[in-house]
Amino acid sequence: MQIFLILLLIIDIIMIGVFVFFYMRFKKVFELPWEDIKESIERAQELVNELKKLKAISEKGPERDLKKEIHLLAQQGYSFKEIAKKLGVSEAEVELVLASKKKY
């Protein structure tokens, strides 16, 4: 019976040592500024949402204006290359817009 109790005491001491070892090893994780991290993540999510809104707006509005400008410049006699250079887009994009029958 005494041997069993001594064996349990030795196992307890070993377990305490293991817990202390792991605590010391992962102490940095426990000390992280979790509130700051949470606030940073929330702010990043807000910025992502704002970017999504801006992207949605830019996909609707300026694209139509760009197509209008391409058609106007083409009507004025500019070449694909000249239109692309003026508007800062590729010649292929200009050609694609002009190839579409839909005018704005």
Image (cartoon, helix red, strand yellow):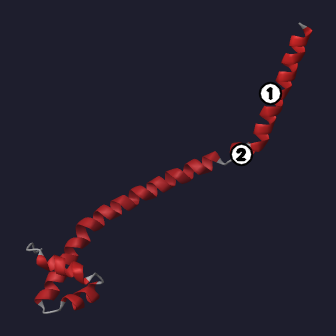
Residue 82's label in the rendered image is none
Instruction: State left or right for residue 104 relative to residue 36.
Output: left
Q: Amino acid at mark 1?
A: Met
| Left or right for 8, reference 41 | right
> Which quarter of the rendered picture does the C terminus lie within?
bottom left
Q: Earlier in the sequence, mark 2 or mark 1?
A: 1
Q: For the point 81% across and 35% down, which residue is it?
A: 20
Mark drawn on residue 31:
2
Q: Position of residue 32 (x, y in %)?
A: 68, 48
Neighbour class for label 1 at 10 Å: few (<14), some, many (≥20)? few
Query: Marks 2 and 1: which is nearer the front?
Result: 1
Q: In the rendered view, does 46 fall on the left or right side of 64?
A: right
Could you tell whether 57 is left or right of 46 in the image?
A: left
Residue 60 sits in quarter: bottom left
Residue that extends furthest to the top in the rendered view of this protein: 1
Task: Indicate whether 59 appears above or below 69.
Answer: above
Name the residue beneath numbered marker 1: 15
Residue 26 location in percent, x, y? 73, 43
Viewer-nearest residue: 72 or 16: 16
